[in-house]
């Protein structure tokens, strides 16, 4: 067997190889959903990607002869440094053949680069941040991933742990099915939750994405920054990062399942639900042009799956039943609109309020992603 050679990604051609090389690992995996190639190439381009406004990264490819067999990024985030000041660096975009030598070579390349940046600890995978694709899937390999979540072979966990990585934190996905809700959630449950949202001064309204996108996005961004401020690894999104997120999901937002809770006219909470675009993305195989975009749009609204992708309550209004009431609102409206399945994700294990609220309903925790950590080797 030919030895492994690690090469740095330097050109546009290299970035294209970096993005497209995972296809070979998933040829027999019917659940994998490819990324949108053009979007990911732009995301890792230092001249275009929003991460590079405040971060620095090196991308590596592992070759065996002329064949790419693995990839990884090593990166530092100056905004993270400002908030945490713990000399931590990160790895991301990990893909690798089932070979311990290849994985070791990739981790060593990332380690050496992070040593050069003065880092004492490395964590990941985060591609590039905690609100991008995060973690190694360690549970839930038998279903298609929902939009904006990752999927990988089971052996990735072994490749990390055999190379000295230890658990840092887990993130969960909860799945709910309309058929189960109809059997196990009585009308009384919904009435009790609605009472929370009908208290004096409280108003719940659906988002107006088509008419007032910027206004609604600004409200969501403001609540999100407060509600998630104590979440594990939280670094506030920059305006450019939030704008990228807004542009990425605006076509997929389900207005009837996305709403803002106001108290005396002040927005205090929100929920954002999106169609599971992966149903459509899978059909276009990562390529929007020349006709993939048409396929995506025509397929999108036929899906009976949606993801509750973001939810937040201002800290001063937590533990008043609003979290549970919003979950019930999404479930009730989702069933009314004919959806058959919802995923509530990704919820970090340390967010006890959201985890406990989800566990009060007949949903199953069916997918888990893990972020690992390891001391750098000098």
Image (cartoon, rainbow, N blue to C red):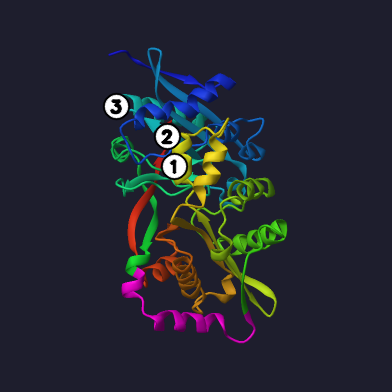
Callout 2 crowding tier (Cα within 10 Å): few <14, some 14–19, many ≥20: many
Task: Tell me whether the residue at label 2 lies in contact with that at label 3, contact meaning CB atoms closer than 8 angstroms.
Answer: no
**Mark number displayed over residue 124:** 1
Judging by the rendered image, the residue that carries numbered circle 3 is 99
Callout 1 crowding tier (Cα within 10 Å): few <14, some 14–19, many ≥20: many
Upstream in the sequence, badge 1 or badge 3?
3
Query: Foreground residue, 209 or 129?
Result: 209
> Which is the main secondary structure of the residues drawn in magenta?
helix
Say whether residue 371 is left or right of residue 14: left
Location of the N terminus (image quadrant): top left
Range of magenta residues: 181-202
Q: Which numbered mark, 1 or 3, is in the foreground of this view?
A: 3
Can you say whether 361 is above or below 307 in the image? Answer: below
Please say whether residue 224 is one of the residues in the magenta stretch: no
Residue 157 visible to the viewer: yes
Task: Tell me whether the residue at label 1 lies in contact with that at label 2, contact meaning CB atoms closer than 8 angstroms.
Answer: yes
Count of labels in the image: 3
Please say whether residue 191 is one of the residues in the magenta stretch: yes
Real-space Cα distance between discs 1 and 3? 19 Å
Callout 3 crowding tier (Cα within 10 Å): few <14, some 14–19, many ≥20: few
Judging by the rendered image, the residue that carries numbered circle 2 is 94
Q: Which numbered mark, 1 or 2, is in the foreground of this view?
A: 2
Query: Foreground residue, 355 or 150?
Result: 150
Which residue sits at x=43%, y=49%? 146
Upstream in the sequence, badge 1 or badge 2?
2
* Secondary structure state at the residue bearing disc 1: strand
Q: Position of residue 294 (x, y in %)?
A: 56, 39
Q: Position of residue 7 (x, y in %)?
A: 47, 19
């Amino acid at each position: 067997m030919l030895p492994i050679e690690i090469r740095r990604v330097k050109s546009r051609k290299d970035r294209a190889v970096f993005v497209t090389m995972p296809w070979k690992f998933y040829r027999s995996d019917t659940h994998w959903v490819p990324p949108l190639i053009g979007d990911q190439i732009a995301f890792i381009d230092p001249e275009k990607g929003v991460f590079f406004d405040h971060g620095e990264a090196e991308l590596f490819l592992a070759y065996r002869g002329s064949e790419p067999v693995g990839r990884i990024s090593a990166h530092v985030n100056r905004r993270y440094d400002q908030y945490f000041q713990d000399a931590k660096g990160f790895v991301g975009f990990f893909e690798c053949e089932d070979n311990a030598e290849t994985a070791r070579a990739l981790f060593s390349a990332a380690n050496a680069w992070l040593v050069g940046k003065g880092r004492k600890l490395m964590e990941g995978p985060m591609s590039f941040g905690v609100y991008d694709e995060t973690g190694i899937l360690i549970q839930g390999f038998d279903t298609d991933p929902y939009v904006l979540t990752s999927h990988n072979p089971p052996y990735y966990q072994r490749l990390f742990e055999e190379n000295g990585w230890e658990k840092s934190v887990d993130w969960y996905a909860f799945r709910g099915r309309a058929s189960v809700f109809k059997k196990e959630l009585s009308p009384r449950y919904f009435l009790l939750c609605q009472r929370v949202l009908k208290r004096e001064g409280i108003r719940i309204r659906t988002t107006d994405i088509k008419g007032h996108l910027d206004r609604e996005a600004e409200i969501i961004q403001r609540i999100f920054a407060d509600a998630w401020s104590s979440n594990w690894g939280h670094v506030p999104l920059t305006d450019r990062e939030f704008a990228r997120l807004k542009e990425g999901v605006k076509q997929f937002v389900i207005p009837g399942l996305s709403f803002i809770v106001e108290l005396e006219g002040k927005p205090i909470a929100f929920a954002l639900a999106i169609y599971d675009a992966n149903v459509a993305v899978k059909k276009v195989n990562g390529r929007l042009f020349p006709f993939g975009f048409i396929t995506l749009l025509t397929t999108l609204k036929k899906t009976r799956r949606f993801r509750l992708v973001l939810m937040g309550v201002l800290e001063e209004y937590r533990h008043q039943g609003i979290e549970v009431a919003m979950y019930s609102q999404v479930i009730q409206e989702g069933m009314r609109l004919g959806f058959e399945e919802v995923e509530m994700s990704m919820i970090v294990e340390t967010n006890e309020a959201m985890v406990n609220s989800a566990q009060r309903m007949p949903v199953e925790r069916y997918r888990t992603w893990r972020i690992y950590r390891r001391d750098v080797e000098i």
